[in-house]
Image (tube, rainbow, N blue to C red):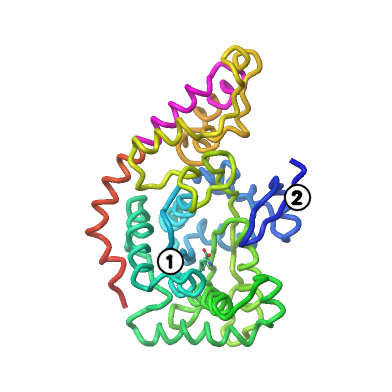
């Protein structure tokens, strides 16, 4: 485990030390807000772990003042548990008074992965929007848009594209290179669109300056730093600086990274319950001992056990129950097989329910797509 930690938008490897990341990136620990906002499992359990400028968001939630939650999605691959962590946050902020902006980064995807615009749109709806709706996203106070089609209201659309265009003056080639390494016109374009995604809710055409929170994984911070620099330097609009939160990485089924290109590393929200159970039985990395006898004697290690980690982050919101599972596994009273079956019970029940809701969500799609 002496492997060096690397955390960039392009590579995550080594043993992750989140406290060191917070220091190195110049963020702050999120813990004190978890105390103010205890009704969010991800906050309470330290999965959302770092932040920048979150004070004004906590304040807006508390005082019921206007604020925005902004995020973007790459419409490629399958929607899996790694994506759910962000979806849960979107829905949390919406239910706490945020106006939600979700950008489908189809221009970015087109320029970096070369899918057709038509395919990208289909994936955005089938994999992302339908799952978001099934998880609880509401059409009210939600602006779900495509980078390639911001709005049919020309004033709003122009404002968004104008900001993306103007942003270019406020960043240097070397700054971009430092962030993106291998740089090309597609990446430059994507970065400018992304900065506009993040700041355009503050334009006069969208109601003027207001607090905006962008929740991301730790590896995405360079994007935030770039956008923040641009926001600071554009003097025309009096932007309130972005707030952001940073969540920990969701461990993959086999213990390593959750990777979209390896279906045995994740559970997709469209996997059948049987498929999911099979994957967990076969692949879930265990923190248990080699034999039942040894496990009873020495106990297991919940900190590296994937079934436990997934229960902790997603499937066992009851704090008392998760603590019991933790303690019983550690003492050896609970066996790996039993822990896996508990997870399987939770996951299959969730998937069954979710997939019904996802089919029903088809009727709602138009409510999200048709707007001014
Ligand atoms: N670049 C992001 C990704 O790779 C997608 C994205 C586009 C985004 N615009 C955004 C994320 C605005 C957050 C906010 O996933």
Q: Residue at x 39, y 30 (%)?
A: 345
Q: Which mark is residue 4?
A: 2
Residue 209 visible at all:
no
Decide whether the magenta segment is chiefly helix, strand or loop: helix
Q: Quadrant of residue 364?
A: bottom left
Q: Is residue 172 left or right of residue 344?
A: right
Pointer 1: what residue?
A: 102
User: In the structure shown, which secondary structural element does the residue marked by tag 2 occupy?
Assistant: loop
Tell which of 99 and 323 is nearer to you.
Answer: 323
User: In the structure shown, which secondary structural element does the residue marked by tag 1 occupy?
Assistant: strand
Quick check: 151 above or below 315?
below
Q: Is residue 25 magenta?
A: no
Quick check: 342 above or below 190?
above
Q: Is residue 363 left or right of residue 115?
A: left
Where residue 193 appears, x then y in whole percent? 51, 77
Q: Quadrant of the C terminus?
A: bottom left
The residue lying furthest to the right in this view is 2
Q: Is mark 2 within 8 Å of ligand 1?
A: no
Residue 236 visible at all:
yes
The total number of labels drawn is 2
Where residue 174 appears, x then y in whole percent? 72, 79
Q: Quadrant of the N terminus?
A: top right
Q: Residue at x 74, y 46 (%)?
A: 3
Nearest-to-viewer mark from 1 and 2: 2
Q: Residue at x 56, y 87 (%)?
A: 166
Q: Is mark 1 within 8 Å of ligand 1?
A: no
Give the class, few, some or many, for how many residues have Cα within 10 Å of label 1's Cα (few <14, many ≥20).
many
**Labels 1 and 2: the sequence-earlier one:** 2
Which span is picked out in magenta? 325-348
Q: Is residue 338 magenta?
A: yes
Give the class, few, some or many, for how many residues have Cα within 10 Å of label 2's Cα (few <14, many ≥20).
few
């Amino acid at each position: 485990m002496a492997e060096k930690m690397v955390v960039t938008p392009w590579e995550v490897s080594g043993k992750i030390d989140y406290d060191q990341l917070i220091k190195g990136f110049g963020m702050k620990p999120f813990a004190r807000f978890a105390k103010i906002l205890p009704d969010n499992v991800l906050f309470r359990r330290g999965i959302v772990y770092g932040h920048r400028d979150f004070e004004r968001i906590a304040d807006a939630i508390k005082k019921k003042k206007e604020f925005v939650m902004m995020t973007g999605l790459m419409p490629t691959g399958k929607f899996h548990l790694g994506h759910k962590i962000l979806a849960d946050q979107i829905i949390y902020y919406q239910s706490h008074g945020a106006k939600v902006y979700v950008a489908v980064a189809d221009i970015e995807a087109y320029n970096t992965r070369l899918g057709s615009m038509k395919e990208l749109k289909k994936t955005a709806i089938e994999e992302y929007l339908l799952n978001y709706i099934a998880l609880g996203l509401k059409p009210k106070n939600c602006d779900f848009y495509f980078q390639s089609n911001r709005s049919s209201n020309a004033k709003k659309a122009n404002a968004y594209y104008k900001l993306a265009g103007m942003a270019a003056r406020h960043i240097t080639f070397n700054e971009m290179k430092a962030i993106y390494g291998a740089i090309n016109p597609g990446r430059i374009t994507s970065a400018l669109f992304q900065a506009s995604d993040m700041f355009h809710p503050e334009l006069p055409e969208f109601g003027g300056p207001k607090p905006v929170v962008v929740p991301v994984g730790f590896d995405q911070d360079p994007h935030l730093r770039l956008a923040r620099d641009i926001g600071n330097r554009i003097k025309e609009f009096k932007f309130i600086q972005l707030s952001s939160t940073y969540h920990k990485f969701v461990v993959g089924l086999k213990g390593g990274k959750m990777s979209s290109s390896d279906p045995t590393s994740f559970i997709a929200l469209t996997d059948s319950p049987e498929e999911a159970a099979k994957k967990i039985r076969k692949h879930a990395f265990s923190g248990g001992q080699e034999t039942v006898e040894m496990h009873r004697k020495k106990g297991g290690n919940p900190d590296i056990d994937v079934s436990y980690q997934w229960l902790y982050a997603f499937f066992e919101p009851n704090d008392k129950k998760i603590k019991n599972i933790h303690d019983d596994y550690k003492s050896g009273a609970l066996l790996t097989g039993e822990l896996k079956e508990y997870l399987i019970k939770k996951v299959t029940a969730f998937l069954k329910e979710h997939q019904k809701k996802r089919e029903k969500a088809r009727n709602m799609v138009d409510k999200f797509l048709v707007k001014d």
